[in-house]
Amino acid sequence: MLLNASPEKQTQACILFFKNLEVKNVHVDIVGRIIKFLEKLNECVRSSVKRCRERSLDQALQLLQGVAVEELSTLEDSHILPVEQLVLLLQLETVTNSTAFKKLEQITLKIAEVNKPLVKTEIETCMSNIVSTKQILSVKDLQTVCVFLEESCIGREVWRGILPLLLCKLADTFPWVLEQEASRNGEWGYLTVKVCLQVFQLLPGEVAPLVWAENSNNEAVQSILTYLLQIIRGKTSNRDTRLLAGTAVAMQINTASKTQDGAEAAVSLLQLTNREQLEFCLGSLRVTVSAAVQDGVDRLAVTRALLTCGRKDILVHELASNGTCLLLDVLFPAVSCLCEENLDCHYYTFQVFSSWLQCVKECLEDIWEVTGTRLLTENSSLIQKLTQLIWNNAESPVEGVSEFVYNSFRVLLEIYRLECERFRDTEKPLYTSLLQRVTALPWQAKAKYFPLCALIPYLGTGKVLEHFTELPRHLLNCLSTNYLSPCASEVYKTMIQWQRQELCAEAGNTLLETELAQQWARHWLDTLSVALTSEVTLLQNNTSSYLLPWTLRTFPAAFEVLTASFNLSSPGHLRAWVTLLSAQRMVTAGPLPLEGAVLETLRLGLHSLDDAVRLGALGFLCCSPKTNQALTQLELSLLKEFLPLNLTCDSSPFRQLLQAAVKKALVRIRESCLACLRKGKANSKKGESTTETMEPVSVLSQGVEFVEWLAQLAVSSLAPGLNFQRKKTALLLLAAVLETCTDSWTPDKKKGQPPENMCALINWSRERGRWDFFTESNLLVLLGCLHDGTNEIRELTAELLGKFFPPCFPETLTAALLEHAGKAMCSPRVQEAQAGAIMMKIVYQKSETLSSLVKNNCKERNDSAQDVKSVSFLLYLLCELDDHYITATRDMLQAARTRPIHGVITTLQRYLVEVPDALISIQKATTNGQDILSRLVETVRKISMFLLGVLYGNQSSSSEEQEAPPSFADMGNAIQSLITQGRGLEQQDGGDAVLLSEEHSLILTCCWVSLKEIGILLGSLVEKALAPPTASTGSLLSIEDLKTIAKVFQEILLKCRHWGAVEGCCVGFTKFCSVLLNHHNPDVKAIPRRMLEQGLSVLSTPRSSSVTRRAAGLPMLILCIVVGEDASKSRPLLAHSMSVVLEIAGTPLPDDWDQTLDLQQVCAVHILQTLVRGSGLGVAMLQFATAMTILSLKALSSPCWAMRNAAIQLFSALCARMLGQRRSRDDSSAQNGMSPPAFFTHYPELKGFLLQELQRAGDPGQGSGEGRLRLIPSLHSVLTLLARLQPGVEDEARSLSVFLDPLLRLAGSPIYAVRVMASKALVAMVSPSEHKTVLLRLVGELPGRKTPCSHNHLHGQLLQIEALLARALDTNELQPDAMQSLVLQFESRAWLVMSSQQCPLIRSAYLRVATMLIRKCSESFLEHLQEALTKELHTPTCRLQLGSAVFRQAAARFLCDEAVRTGAAEKADQASQLLMMEDPDIRLAVVTWIAEGQRWKCTPMWNVLKKALKDNLQTVLEERSGEHLKVYLEAFVAVTGVTDREGQIGGCPVPPSEPDTGECVEALLSMLERAQSSPDLLSHALCAASLLLADSTDTPLLERWCEVLERHSDPDSTETLRLAAARSLQLVGVALVQKALNTPAPHPALARRLVNTGVYLLQDEDPQVRGEAAKFASLVNSLWRKLPGERSCLHVQSSKGLLCLFELLLQEFGAGLETLELFLSHLPESDMGSVLQELEEPESVSLYEQDEANVFAEPAVISQLLLPYLLQLTEKLAFSSDHRERVAHWVTTNTAGILQNMGCCKLWCSRGAAAAPGPLAALGCPRLHSAVTALFVRATVLLHAMEILGEEQAARTGKGTGTGCTPQRLRSELEETHRLLTQHGIFIPLLHL
């Protein structure tokens, strides 16, 4: 057996050797155990899945370790040798898999325990062969050397012995590696350096003499050092290789025996990076190196290496007698310069900075000894430099930098503490000054919180809260955002942990937990209570996820404190209570009792309308700190009650969290059941009594039954016709069941694998007829889901089928599925074709006879490899593709209808890429696998060229001949020509059609979807074919194939205008470029580079280089190529592309430019925008940000509109990239961006440019008067950028003060938008300490009454005052004396709001500022102001005055606000009188204020507004002013129908005795009946009419209102009107139903109709409508059941509300057949004959099908829900003497039809697969499932009625209908029909039989 044999052959030979071994003097069992060990190794070798190989290897290791050394010692050397050779061979095959190699190394060590010399000899032979027989070391050789040096102790001994040979071979390898670009920049160069590093690190004793001994003259070591230095200096562009080379040289320095020698060498190495050429000395080695480039990476590599790997004694060695050392005086200046430079390696520079501080901390004692003084005195230059670096980079956008900065800050504080202790400094002023700086930062700054966490241990929580009183409020603000929640959590956690430590330390650990909790509550109870009960979902969720668990862990008694603070009748408190309960369960080991009030409240939570409450309650039921804690019977029953009602939630996060919670419950069930099995087995062995085993069996059976029930629930919820929400939730639940309760081992998962003894539980369950999840009926149901119209359902279903179901489907099913999938694959509808592709993939994965099935459809039969499934299936698909292509070339219209190409392309992609080992099996099965794929590539190329030709309108000639893609008009004409030819007509000229024809849509969809799928297929195919393990066994794609694919991509991207095709193609092209650019073959790497050059040459073409908006596919082509570059390298392609594009973009426009033609400069700017927005480049683009920003701002002055348009788009992308994505719609939001000092630290060149632009704009032009400034096109964008910077950061260096004067001058800009944006920019550029000064300056500069001034400048000043004051008030930065001075000056300029000021905009601005200062102003000023405003509003104004309406509306709102603030009745009356003003603007402003703000609630103004709105309603209705009427009605509804504190709708009805009420109702109802107004107006009119009718007894009016309500509840009505109908039900419906329940019903039919309307609205597709209807159901149910106070105000979810209304109808309105008819009206039609006939008719070819009006409605589910109520109602009526005969008549009437329909079902089932489309077509038919369900419901009700009526009545029924039907026969028919339908995948529960 030889080491060069294949592992598989070697393993088999080894097994055969031991099987034939004659056992002499060998332990009796050893050979068999060795054979088992070898068989596991054989499994490892044969598997192609990494995790499967590791699993087999781990099992082999366990088998061998189970063999004692003594037993192995009985084997002879000749027996051990083949095993060791096999293991060594496997080690050589796994050198790139560290995990597998380590396991094999353990096997080697086990063998070495028996015979180490033999093992060492074999390894030495192998290693010597590497370095003695080869000229240079290959990549595989270097990998072998690396792994044996690092992971093998015996291998390291071997290399120690042959080190000179290895060094010589490394010296010989370096020149070869560095000669070619691909090798030096790739893996070869990296591994060569890595081996050097490992040699220097792991063999220092052998290396040291070669470096430091005098006259050693080792040429190999000297050569290696030379090459390493060349790499450091830039010989390679691979940054990782350069960093590694620096580490290798540092390791060489570490071998120095004398510290001084090492320090001198380190200094020399650092100096080497700062000079052009220098001789470097390292011991006896002398080398001279010239630099290739000096880009800062060389200095980074050296400093990083010395700090991370350098010996500490060398770093702190005193360089001279003046107290200097390498760490402080040489390394720190280098590190500081690196951090300040704008290098493209910020992550590494701050890693170095953090390492430097860590080294200082570790070497502090030695540093003190060398320097003799402290390092960090308060004002030392070192501390200032360190803090400056930390603050400037704390907000770095580069990922990972902030973490290094945070760590550096912590280390700095620790160093300072150590120095204070050493030098006895008790004051420690640095901590306090840092805290002051932290508290000055705005709460939105992320950099505020990490230093605060670090400071808490040093200052103590008391001092922090004393100096930072706003901390709780800031934490709440943070928890309202996602990006700051972790920071706030960390601060809170640190605070309470240190608070507990301090409390315990002060009291000597004598405080009880309750006392500790009370101390906690003093500071934090209010904060947590507010957050947990908040209506802000994000705040509540983040508090419950972050703060609450830490609170309960740190202060366990806080649970009782928090519980006492909740009032369940208040909004949000139930959610808080449930959240608290769940958190307590997770942190408490013991179970929480579920009984009494706790259980009742939990039930309320489980049925709450709030998703968060229900999830919290579910989480409480499912979670447990112990995974083997069994669920109680009560918990299981609550889950069974909960889950069916929560399958239709619209929220995707809800579904995910529901699945996660249920999965936790299933894990608990599984683990508890396994524990019971183990316990039962142990008890049976001990022979214990039966009673002791009863409890485990009970737990076991309960758990198994629940899992069975859950699986059946999930499967039954997957029927066609059920809504997307139910199906998605059901699939998630089914996935949870299959992942948890099956023994399927998943190779791609590291965790979550089934327990080893899972089979025992499965067998126990199946013995009892449970857990048979993979029945044929279940399989058919899932196959029906593959027909679904949504990708999510299809993908998840396919995943479940492929992962969990048995490997082979029944043969008959496979054949039918293949035929059905083939038809679907050829559908012109994209979703159906995709469904066909998925079904094809499933067929391939689950069929053993696929080769024979597809062979008949494939024309090629000359290759024996066709018998292999993978090859035959691929050839079959290729034949299909050829057929589609040929059809398209003959008749494109026919092809678009019946052979649309994209379905086959999608199928190929799913098969070749998504099926594991598809390409490998093709490769193994045939020798011409490359030819088959080449054929595929060529066919796809021809198809793509043909489709592009179709869009060109020239199918005969290739699109390659065309230079530019066609316009959209040309494409339309080309497609129209094809349509005309397909119809056999002549081309006719006609007018342009407004809508595309069906034929046009068919052809266009066929073209663009096929092109998109071609791109995805080719990219994914290349990625799979060139990646291991496929590529390791030989390439399936030749260079020519790759070039062809590249040409296809290039043609599509450059010559197709359709953005869907371009965008989809880019998905595949990105993969293509990434694989090729990182390939080891230089020819392969050159392909995307050549494409880039061609793309840039297209851009450089003088003539039109772009023919569509945003340059179409060219930017995407360039983006995809540069994204594919290795991020660890210097990205030369990106640098080159940016150089070319920036140069072209900055080129001046030609003198003869034409705006009708695209320009190369415009295209270049669009390319830049695309590169900036590309997520794949990320921070790599930041190095070009300055140049692009300047370019975009300058381009805004271009005379070309297209250039300006492109520039503003680029600028927007740059702002998002540099400052981060906006977290709110407001550009100037303080939550966005970074602070100005940090921004200008990262982009220093921008500071001067932006300032220059502001100064240019602020300098008045020649001859211009005051207020007339220069118009700078870039000004608004410059101000926008400054405004997005984060305000509130102190500018200690006052570097931003230069911006102040230009911004203040811009207050006089003649452009309104500039004045507004200048005010926002001023806020960002003014430090908090300057707020007072600037505000007083601005207010002081406001002119007096007679001072001449510019209106623009005055308006701008007021805007700046408003913006700056808002910031100062928000941060509470103005001291009382400053505020008083500011208010006095402001009041003195009151003339600015008086009538003497002619500009309404100025008056409005002054009024807004006055509103902000309202609580600080004097009473006299306010009285004077209100009098003036009131007088102004009552004075007629000129309607033509610009801005007059704005001011008058602002004045009206101000007076209303003042009336609410003061609470004075007189002011409230004055404000209400504004509703009757003649000025419509004032009236509109007041009603808008009422409708939107609702600040009048719970104030005396409430009643005043109610009366005023009621009194004026008739007048407003008569005016019929559309907008005013709509807002007026909205305000009327808001005030009259109010929400009280508990959230319950409480109507404030207008007394019916009012004379004008009836007229108002009549007018509103007439408006609603005419339905000629807008939906918004009608919706408010409906609610208003409802309120007016609340106490009405006018039956005709109520009937009309009810009819309107029913009409607007219809699914065809608009969402606005349906929502208004639901709200009207709350406003009035509740009261009317209550009257019907509590009194002799005056309107029983009306109440029944209202409840029925609620039933329909509870099924509405709009979740908001369902929510409002659920509130109606909740209120009606609570009034009916007379629930106590706190329960009556809690709303239930819509599904529960539906059951409540059904129960109400049954119990209170079930006395007559009207309710029975009402119930039956909700059942869909069940005419099976027409349904089955429609199923067998051929489908019409069309792209789209009409959706149902209500896609959420589920007739089948409603039918099943109604069944128990129908049965009870039937029973009630049948036993009633008044209705018995009518029930009998109903039975007689319906029996024949039901039997006939069941007969149709049985006939259809009996025909089976012979039916026209076969049973598979029925699996996706919604109408069939709904009809069958309704049929079974009707039949069940009929059966129940017949059984109640008795045999005599049944006989009469049979005679009357001529059917002879008896209850027994009907039951038999039902059971038989159910059985047949279930076999055919029509899953209907056997309902109540």
Image: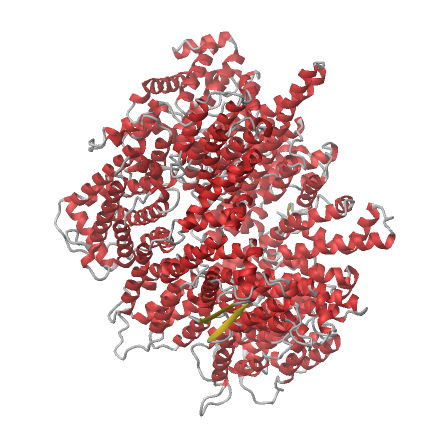
Tally of marks:
0
Location of residue 1104 with respect to 916 vertically, above or below? below
Above or below 281: residue 49? above
- Image-quadrant location for residue 1648: top right
Tell me what residue is drawn at x 50 percent, y 7 percent: 1847
**Who is closer to the viewer here, 813 or 1284?**
813
1858 sits left or right of 686 in the view: left
Residue 1521 in view (yes/no):
no
Instruction: Give whichever of 1762, 112 is nearer the camera.
Output: 112
Residue 914: image quadrant is top left
| Colour pattern of the rendering | secondary structure
Residue 1626: percent from the left, percent from the top?
59, 43
Is 1279 on the left-hand or right-hand side of 1858? right
Please give left or right for residue 468 compared with residue 1524 in the image.
Answer: right
Q: Position of residue 1709 (x, y in %)?
A: 58, 28
- Horizontal side of 868 relative to 480 (left or right) equals left
Instruction: Give the residue displayed 29% in from the left and 60% down from the top.
Output: 1090
Instruction: Write down the quadrant of residue 705 in the picture.
Output: top right
Q: Is residue 372 above or below residue 1710?
A: below
Residue 560: image location, x then y, percent: 78, 43
Looking at the rendered image, the quarter that the N terminus falls into is top left
Can residue 951 be seen at all in this image of the molecule?
yes
Point out the residue furthest to the bottom here: 1263
Image x and y of residue 646, in percent: 55, 36
**Front one among 1512 and 162:** 162
